[in-house]
Image (spheres, helix red, strand yellow):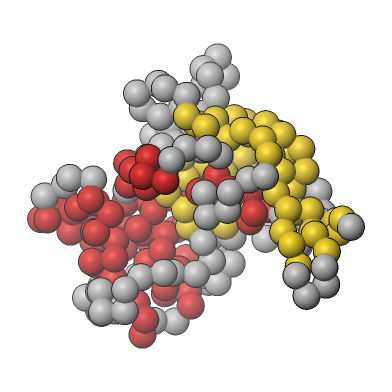
Amino acid sequence: MSGDPPLLEVTGLEKTFTIHARGRRVVALRGLSFTVRAGEIVALLGPSGAGKSSVLKCIWRTYRPDAGAIRYRPADERILDLATLPEPEIVALRVRELAFVTQFLHALPRLSALEVVARPLRRQGLPRALAEERARSALRASGLPERLVDLPPATFSGGERQRVNLARAFAAEPRLLLLDEPTASLDPASRERVFAQIVAARARGAGILAIFHDPEAIERSADRVVEVRGTAEAA
């Protein structure tokens, strides 16, 4: 692994937000650089408000960085800069190679948990039966009760919705997995299941960039830690 080129290489990443009501700019990220290799878990460390979630959103391209490069090496070995890549290509990468687990589940209200997890697999080209089989397996691994699989997640508790969110990401078997506090709303037994899934994803070669609220989670799972500095106001 150490001799391979990075799966993800972030250099000089910067992001600033404007607070119009105060007439000020908040520097969320300034000059951040790090790498993530295939089969490696890298944890982002820093106080609340330091910009850790902004890092993940810049990579996912929910946010457009103000400066810097986010070089990603897809399966075809090209080098793509996610900071400047056209939107259609970003969307295609999300289908094929990237997954992002936020602290909130975003899904159409009428879709069942099974459909939420199976839909990205269908977009990858899997037949319906195989997609649903893999989705059921992922939901089972996440600890979602079988009685909830065919119900809409909008009716679930926060922890149950997070299990669906995690199952959707792990079922897709992404090459790069972004995790934003994936265990924050889970009970101890469910957290153990998530750690098992993270370890399994690393074992199959996924690169993982994660934010954990629990120092113990960092200690037990991270191969490396990247420190993210706090935000600062600019004139």
Residue 57, horizontal then vertical, whole percent: 57, 53
Residue 145 is at least partly visible in this image = no
Residue at the top extreme?
Answer: 3
Residue at the bottom extreme?
Answer: 155
Task: Judge left or right: residue 1 versus residue 35.
Answer: left
Instruction: Tally the numbered discs.
Output: 0
Residue 229 is at least partly visible in this image = yes
Identity of the residue drawn at 52% across and 32% down: 81
Above or below residue 192? Residue 173 is: above
Identity of the residue drawn at 37% across and 40% down: 89
Residue 205, horizontal then vertical, whole percent: 42, 32
Residue 99, horizontal then vertical, whole percent: 42, 49
Work out whether residue 197 or residue 207 is closer to the camera in this orientation and state it.
207
Q: Quadrant of residue 164?
A: bottom left
Q: Quadrant of residue 230?
A: bottom right
Q: Quadrant of residue 24?
A: bottom right
Above or below residue 172? Residue 109 is: below
Task: Judge left or right: residue 33 versus residue 181.
Answer: right
Above or below residue 137? Residue 32 is: above
Work out whether residue 138 or residue 51 is closer to the camera in this orientation and state it.
51
Work out whether residue 139 or residue 90 is closer to the camera in this orientation and state it.
90
Quarter of the figure with the C terminus: bottom right
Residue 218, horizontal then vertical, whole percent: 66, 49
Identity of the residue drawn at 12% across and 55% down: 128
